[in-house]
Image (cartoon, rainbow, N blue to C red):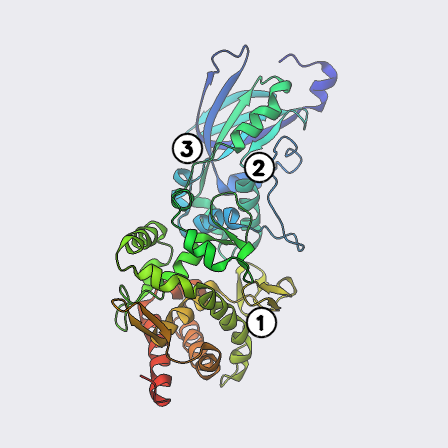
Amino acid sequence: MAVSDAQRSALVEFLVHVDDFRSHRIPGLTNSKVGSCFIRGDELIKHLDLDKWLAVNPRVPTRSAKEVLTGHVVRGIQDTLREAPSDFALKNQGLYLLVASIGEYERQRDGGRLRFTMLDPFSHGLCNGGHTYAAVREYAERAENPQTLEEVWIRLHLFEGIDPDKVPAMAEGLNRSRQVDDPSLMNLEGQFADIRKTLQGKPGHKEIAYRQGDPGNYYITEIIRAIMFFNSERFNGRKHPNTLYRQQKQMLDAFRDDAEKRPSPISLIVPHVHEILVLMDMIAQATPAACKRLKPPFELGRMKGEKSGVRAGSAEHKDTPLFFLGTTMDHKIHTGWLLVMLAAFRANVRWDLAKGKFTWKSPLEELLPKVIDGLVAICVQEYRDNKSKPDEIARNPAVYDRCYKEIELELLRSGIR
């Protein structure tokens, strides 16, 4: 693309350190080429500011009223950044950039330096990968351990010489070509139909995304996990569902297998799924007060949040929705704490698969106030004594066991077996 003197003065040059670089022409398109390389997450933060180059992207990440990224897509990206940074290059398609020119690549011992330029924000910029870019930048600002970005490699795809008339169609096409994940395929197969039917019309049902790209604050995998926590064919008082935490494929395989069995454990639980989700919200709602009742009291509001610099009781978490309960609260309870406490209520289930029986031994609204202090005390003790990161508690079978036994003991005290 020929550049005039006036345009040249408006060119914005980027210089980034990357791991190798390759380019080749695009067949059928005159004077065009595509380049490919990988850039470290921390290098992207320092030297690849694309905030002014987002106009060519038709998909804008959703943010809350407090300018925090929302949705399961961003949450999944940030989970990988936090839990498996070295896998990021395999799990993420990267950033697609339309550029004015791809400049020289200067090889060095540990990769090399790449120059490229942009000119017109409506023809050049980030045409695909907006969620990835936004998630990485927010993670760098808010994460408890942003150093994991040093282990993250993000792929860059650079397109030079693309006719401006083709930019909108190209950007739209790239944004529709995402890989279909397992839950989306299962939804296509109708495996979530009973869940959808059970939740239809109940508080929170519109917040569940059943496939990639659907709106909603909960992805269907989070609902499946809650269902599997109460699967007494797989878990009991000795074997606990800690193996389901961050093991999505294993969890989905187990769900699929159990859904196909006759009689089916999943079919036994699904009619109670909204009760389980309401219980999850009730636990979250009751946790701050339980922390205050501990001896000594635990200052939940000052506890470090999942995002760096944002504590559990910060102003950012004011009016946090409890969608299934239909109300709000002013704290953000860590996922790990919620999971171990929720799973413990499997001890309150009378289960007989052969007879198709799933009932609560004690009404949940009566049992929860009796056990919440003990459950929260277990989480706090683990946090204090073992310096366990709140979300890491959900990996620890011993914590699940202690919470489960807390409910068992209360039921025995009440003469319920």
- Measuring 54% from the left and 22% from the top, which residue is drawn there? 159
Can you identify the residue that label 2 sits on? 47
Disc 1 vs disc 3: which is toward the camera?
Answer: 1
Can you identify the residue that label 3 sits on? 110
| Residue 324: mark | none
**Secondary element at image label 3:** loop
**Secondary element at image label 1:** helix
In which quarter of the view is residue 390 placed?
bottom left
* Residue 307 % position (x, y): 54, 58
Q: Tag 3: residue type?
A: Asp
Mark 1 and mark 2 residues within 8 Å of each other at the beta carbon: no
Can you identify the residue that label 1 sits on? 301
Q: Which of marks 1 and 2 is nearer the N terminus?
A: 2
Q: Tag 1: residue type?
A: Gly
* Residue 331 % position (x, y): 58, 68
Q: How far apart are marks 1 and 3 (CA)?
A: 44 Å
Residue placed farthest to the front in the image?
Answer: 355
Does the rendering let one see residue 304? yes
Which one is in front, 256 or 268?
268
Q: Distance between the residues labelled 1 and 2?
A: 35 Å
**Secondary element at image label 2:** helix
Disc 1 vs disc 2: which is toward the camera?
Answer: 1
Q: Earlier in the sequence, mark 2 or mark 3?
A: 2
Left or right for 138, reference 194: right
Disc 2 vs disc 3: which is toward the camera?
Answer: 2
- Measuring 35% from the left and 60% from the top, which residue is drawn there? 267
- Measuring 51% from the left and 57% from the top, which residue is drawn there? 200
